[in-house]
Image (cartoon, rainbow, N blue to C red):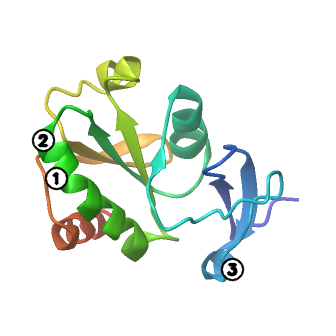
Amino acid sequence: MNDPDSLLIACPACHALNRVPQARLGDYPKCGKCGAALFPGKPVALDEAGFHAHVERADLPVLVDFWAPWCGPCRMMAPQFEAAAAQLEPYVRLAKVDTEAQPALGARFGIRSIPTLALFKGGRELARQAGAMGVADIVRWTRQYL
């Protein structure tokens, strides 16, 4: 039976879905399949399968940083984005999509400039912001849509 007070959380290591009671999100839950921490305190790198599990199937909102390794502003924002993960988890999953390695995901969402942040919930895009931001701006921008 599904508990309405539980959330499906995708594992950042194996992408298996785990049912976690909302009241236990802050208790450092681990994946029932591989044993990895469900909230590692840093962004999760996503490919197509990972994107499907975390954004389209899991219940947590997901903030995705679309970036590329050659992009200077992307590299400059990376530590800021990682610091934001520590502030937003366990209530928001932060993820990164390398548009060079995953061009189909970039094309699917019409990413025209990088870095671009896109906030998803329930598989739907809620908001989008292009350009590098600092940690406080990332956290503030994300929270205004949740």
Q: Nearer the viewer, mark 1 or mark 3?
A: 1
Per the rendering, the mark at residue 87 is none
Q: Residue 123: image x %, image y %?
A: 48, 41
Q: Residue 117: image x %, image y %?
A: 25, 47
Q: What amino acid is found at the position of numbered circle 3 in the picture?
A: Arg
For the N terminus, which image quadrant? bottom right
Q: What amino acid is found at the position of numbered circle 2 in the picture?
A: Gly
Q: Is residue 111 above or below residue 86?
A: above
Q: Give the residue displayed 16% in from the left and 68% down from the top.
A: 137
Q: Name the residue under label 1.
A: 76
Q: In terms of sequence position, does the residue under pointer 1 or pointer 3 come before the other?
A: 3
Is the Cβ of the residue at disc 1 closer than 8 Å to that at disc 2? yes
- Report which quarter residue 26 is drawn in: bottom right
Dot 2: within a 10 Å radius of its alpha carbon, few (fewer than 14), some, or many (20 or more) residues?
A: few
Asked which secondary structure carries label 2, the reply is: helix
Q: Name the residue under label 2.
A: 72
- Report which quarter residue 84 is drawn in: bottom left
Give the CA distance from mark 3 to mark 2: 38 Å
The answer to whether residue 134 is left or right of residue 61 is left
Per the rendering, the mark at residue 24 is 3
For the C terminus, which image quadrant? bottom left
Dot 1: within a 10 Å radius of its alpha carbon, few (fewer than 14), some, or many (20 or more) residues?
A: some
Q: Give the residue displayed 20% in from the left and 54% down from the top.
A: 77
The answer to whether residue 76 is left or right of residue 33 is left
Q: Residue 124: image x %, image y %?
A: 41, 41
Q: Give the residue displayed 51% in from the left and 43% down from the top.
A: 55
The answer to whether residue 64 is left or right of residue 11 is left
Residue 4 visible somewhere in the drawing: no
Give the CA distance from mark 1 to mark 2: 6 Å
Q: Give the residue displayed 13% in from the left and 52% down from the top.
A: 132
Q: What amino acid is found at the position of numbered circle 1 in the picture?
A: Met
- Report which quarter residue 136 is drawn in: bottom left
